[in-house]
Image: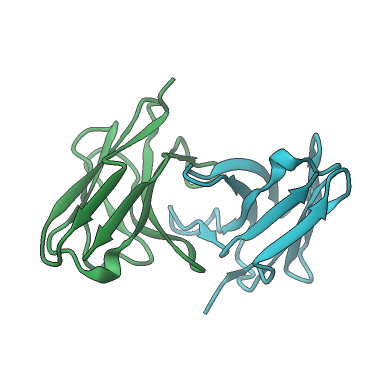
Chain colours: A green, B cyan
């Protein structure tokens, strides 16, 4: 049972490069989220989706875009990466509004 | 301004003893609270939750206590085991508010010594 899968697990980018993180869930959950975790900062919500075709901004959305074209996938894009976006990114899904979230294993992104 | 605060970055406890992890919140609109556990190189996993209509919720070795007047909750682990060593995040939610509004604390790293 895969649950929530994130790809890639690790990526190194140069400043200004673009990339996309893919999140896939096989639990038929309506809600999906992207968080970032930084040392001493806990988990901060970047963007979220309450269903296929919907997206909304979270606490720290600047510099990121998202898309939810299919219910099972939630993509996080960085159009022009900056060193401040060096972080560990976690995708999560749930079958109701927040509450119990199921997280992926994380994607470590380094921007040089 | 932090809405969910975990003021102890770390806690060390002897195996078999009680671990108490604390969490304070400032937003009186929060009405649902959760604890997540995170091992290194893994995503957080849900541990236990409590609604604001309760003051205690128990699940095996884990008990969460909620003191609404003090805006304080705590997670008790009894007895503590070495496998409990992880980072514990407190999170809060306003169920009647905007969706996706789960606010996390910064986490407390628990080390259980054999």
Position of B100 with respect to A64 (left or right) is right
- A9 relative to A84, above or below: above
Q: Point out the image quarter for the N terminus of chain A.
A: top left
Position of A73 with respect to B31 (left or right) is left
Outermost residue on the top side: it is A1
Residue A75 visible in the shown view: yes
Position of B32 with respect to B12 (left or right) is left
Q: Residue at x 30, y 63 (%)?
A: A86
- Label tally: 0
Residue B104 on image: x %, y %: 54, 60
Q: Residue at x 52, y 61 (%)?
A: B103
Outermost residue on the right side: it is B17
Instruction: Pick the residue in front: B22 or A83.
Output: A83
Outermost residue on the front side: it is B114
Residue B47 on image: x %, y %: 65, 41
Residue A30 on image: x %, y %: 37, 36
Residue B21 visible in the shown view: no
Q: Point out the image quarter for the C terminus of chain A.
A: bottom left
Residue B49 on image: x %, y %: 67, 46
Q: Residue at x 59, y 58 (%)?
A: B92
Q: Residue at x 60, y 60 (%)?
A: B107
């Amino acid at each position: 049972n895969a649950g929530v899968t994130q790809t890639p697990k690790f990526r190194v980018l140069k400043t200004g490069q673009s990339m996309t993180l893919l999140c896939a869930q096989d639990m038929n959950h309506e809600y999906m989220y992207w968080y970032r975790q930084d040392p001493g900062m806990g988990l901060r919500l970047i963007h979220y989706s309450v269903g296929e075709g919907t997206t909304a901004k979270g606490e720290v959305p600047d510099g990121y875009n998202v898309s939810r074209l299919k219910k099972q996938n939630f993509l996080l894009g960085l159009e022009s990466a900056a060193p401040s976006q060096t972080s560990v990114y976690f995708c999560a899904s749930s079958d109701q509004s927040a509450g119990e979230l199921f997280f992926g294993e994380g994607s470590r992104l380094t921007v040089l | 301004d932090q809405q969910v605060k975990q003021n102890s970055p770390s806690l060390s406890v002897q195996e078999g003893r009680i671990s108490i992890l604390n969490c304070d919140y400032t937003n009186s609109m929060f009405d649902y609270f959760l604890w997540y556990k995170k091992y290194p190189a893994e995503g957080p996993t849900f541990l236990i939750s409590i609604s604001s209509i309760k003051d205690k919720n128990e699940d095996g070795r884990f008990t969460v206590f909620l003191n609404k007047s003090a805006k304080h909750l705590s997670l008790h682990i009894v007895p503590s085991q070495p496998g409990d060593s992880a980072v514990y995040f407190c999170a809060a939610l306003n169920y009647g508010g905007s969706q996706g509004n789960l606010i996390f604390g910064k986490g407390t790293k628990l080390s259980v010594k054999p």
